[in-house]
Image (tube, rainbow, N blue to C red):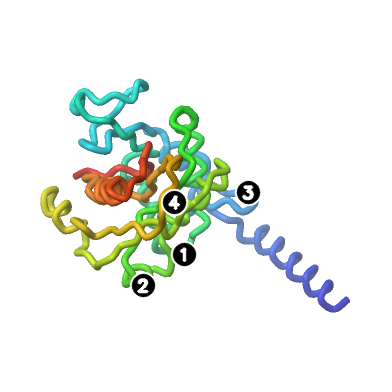
């Protein structure tokens, strides 16, 4: 009985707090939010208004045919992104990764699927593999943002997640401080496949930000050499090189 009374009191206090101090949008602070939303519809619309596909090999935009005019002789692997790494999408990602708003990962992953549902249905990936962090960065941050996104994607699409299939076997330098060539060299041999890959696996690689593509291409190399097949990749945002 006492427990029920405490629960009712807590609920009443939360309702009172919402009435006195209504939740404002985490990004623009200009819109009042309903329920447990963190970002207003206007900011979400701006953040996801440039969803498109990129070529994993060269980073150029892809059309609906999933063919790349720059990589005509190569098997094209599309990368689905929500938009460019600029505000408000950049700020949403920062709040997700660094400010404790981990549930934004669920919203980002769901919007990624909704905006690219035709590509998911066309390529039919059946295994999600997140790009791993090294142990130092994982301890420092407390979670792998790519794994959070992969978990939501796997649940939403009802496919399997293989969180430990790809691991980072050595620490690398911070990619943000390196140019195009040095990024690729920095990551060379950094990923290892630790599990057997099923012959019928059609893998989607998932990360948070796509810049030069060096990270995803190195993950692709490791998986391909282990006998796996990557059919597509996905990231929340694409950043300028």
Q: Earlier in the sequence, mark 2 or mark 4?
A: 4
Residue that label 1 marks? 100
Mark number displayed over residue 27:
4
Q: Quadrant of residue 99?
A: bottom left
Residue at 47%, 56% in the rendered image: 148
Q: Nearer the viewer, mark 2 or mark 4?
A: 2
Residue that label 2 marks? 140
Q: Nearer the viewer, mark 2 or mark 1?
A: 2
Q: Position of residue 204 (x, y in %)?
A: 41, 43
Residue at 22%, 43% in the rendered image: 240
Marks 1 and 3 sit apart, C-alpha to C-alpha, by: 20 Å
Evaluate whether residue 25 shows in this view.
Answer: no
Q: Quadrant of the C terminus?
A: top left
Q: Nearer the viewer, mark 2 or mark 3?
A: 2
Residue that label 3 marks? 34
Above/below status of 171 relative to 72:
below
* Badge 2 element: helix
Marks 3 and 4 sit apart, C-alpha to C-alpha, by: 15 Å
Mark number displayed over residue 164:
none
Marks 2 and 4 sit apart, C-alpha to C-alpha, by: 25 Å
Above/below status of 76 relative to 6:
above
* Badge 3 element: loop
């Amino acid at each position: 009985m006492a427990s029920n009374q405490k629960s009712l009191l807590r609920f009443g206090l939360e309702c009172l707090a919402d009435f006195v101090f209504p939740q404002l949008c985490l990004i623009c602070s200009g819109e009042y939010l309903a329920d447990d939303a963190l970002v207003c519809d206007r900011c979400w619309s701006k953040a996801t208004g440039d969803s498109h596909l990129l070529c994993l090999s060269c980073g150029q935009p892809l059309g609906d045919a999933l063919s790349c005019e720059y990589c005509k002789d190569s098997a094209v692997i599309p990368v689905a992104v929500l938009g460019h790494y600029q505000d408000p999408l950049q700020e949403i990602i920062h709040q997700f990764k660094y400010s404790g708003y981990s549930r934004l990962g669920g919203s980002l992953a769901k919007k990624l699927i909704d905006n690219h549902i035709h590509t998911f249905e066309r390529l039919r990936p059946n295994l999600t593999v997140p790009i791993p962090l090294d142990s130092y960065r994982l301890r420092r941050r407390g979670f792998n943002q790519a794994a959070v996104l992969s978990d939501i994607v796997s649940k939403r699409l009802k496919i399997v997640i293989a969180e430990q299939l790809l691991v980072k076997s050595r620490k690398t330098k911070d990619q943000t401080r390196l140019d195009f060539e040095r990024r690729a060299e920095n990551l060379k041999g950094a990923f290892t496949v630790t599990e057997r890959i099923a012959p019928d696996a059609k893998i989607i690689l998932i990360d948070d930000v796509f810049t030069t593509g060096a990270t995803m291409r190195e993950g692709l190399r490791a998986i391909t050499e282990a006998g796996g097949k990557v059919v597509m990749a996905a990231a929340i945002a694409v950043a300028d090189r």
